[in-house]
Amino acid sequence: MGKIIENNLIIKIDKIRPNDYNIKLDHHSTNEGRVQFVRVKQSLMFHGQMESIKVRYISDEDYYEIINGYLIWSAMKELGFEEAEVKNFGGITREEAIKKYLSLEELKIPLDVIEVSQLLKKIKESDISLRGFPYAGKEIDEKIKLLDFDWDQFNEENKQLGLLGDFSKNEELEKEIEEEIKEETEIEIEKEIESSVEKDFRKPAFEEKDNNMQTKSLGDIRDEDIKASTGVDKLL
């Protein structure tokens, strides 16, 4: 059975603060960063907040520190949002927060540019409004033009010229990473099983009233665990 490690909340945007390790913090310093920030703002104006901001709770100062979602938070503040949806990971350490931040960033699989172009072409041909896409009108046209390009011939020519590199080395590295992750996962599973076995031998949580033993409900225990780790009384 899975364990509760997070909680979605709607909170005042002023209760949220940035962290000091965000690699994307200075997004106004590059043209690419500025363009991406404008896209985030346009998406918020059209769709509203679609993705929750990942945070951890800092109980000593009673605020929520951003783990992932700084651009969304910053854009929402500029647009005058008063509240934001957050996914709260509770009172985890700074080190654990950095692990989650890098995992959330690195595990995003890039979109296939050709398949994106095909989707855009179908929608444009259906005469549906193109508002709400994360691209300008000219960008959509340029992406659709990619479908006319002969990619097979391009790849073959570059392969003959030796410009595509040695993919066998990449495959070997992928296998090494896969084996390492598999080994680490098996170790973690063994630890969790051992931990579960130990818990089975412990006495259930109870409270004594009028000399009668009364076992607490799972709901009570769950709510107490959530309050201890997140500062929130119960799940919404």
Image (tube, grey):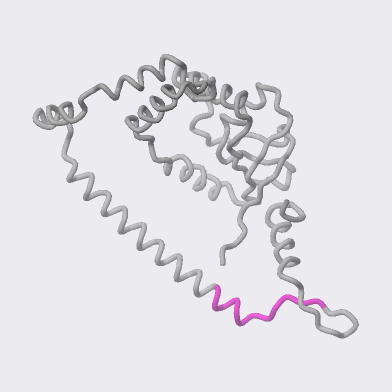
Q: Nearer the viewer, residue 149 or 169?
A: 149
Residue visible at 35% across and 63% down?
A: 183
Q: Nearer the viewer, residue 54 or 49?
A: 49
Residue visible at 70% across and 62% down?
A: 225
Residue visible at 68% across and 35% down?
A: 84
Which residue is farthest right?
A: 210
Q: Position of residue 110 (x, y in %)?
A: 38, 36
Q: Quadrant of residue 184?
A: bottom left
Q: Position of residue 235 (x, y in %)?
A: 72, 54
Residue 18 part of the magenta segment: no
Q: Is residue 106 above or below residue 152?
A: below
Q: Nearer the viewer, residue 47 or 223?
A: 47
Which residue is farthest bottom?
A: 211
Which residue is farthest left?
A: 160
Q: Is residue 69 above or below residue 193?
A: above
Q: Is residue 27 visible?
A: no
Which residue is farthest front?
A: 126
Q: Position of residue 45 (x, y in %)?
A: 62, 23
Q: Is residue 215 above or below residue 222?
A: below
The reply, left or right, for residue 45 in relation to residue 126 is right
Q: Quadrant of residue 54?
A: top right
Q: Quadrant of the N terminus?
A: bottom right
The reply, left or right, for residue 226 in relation to residue 157 is right
Q: Is residue 107 visible?
A: yes
The part of the chain drawn in magenta is: 196-207
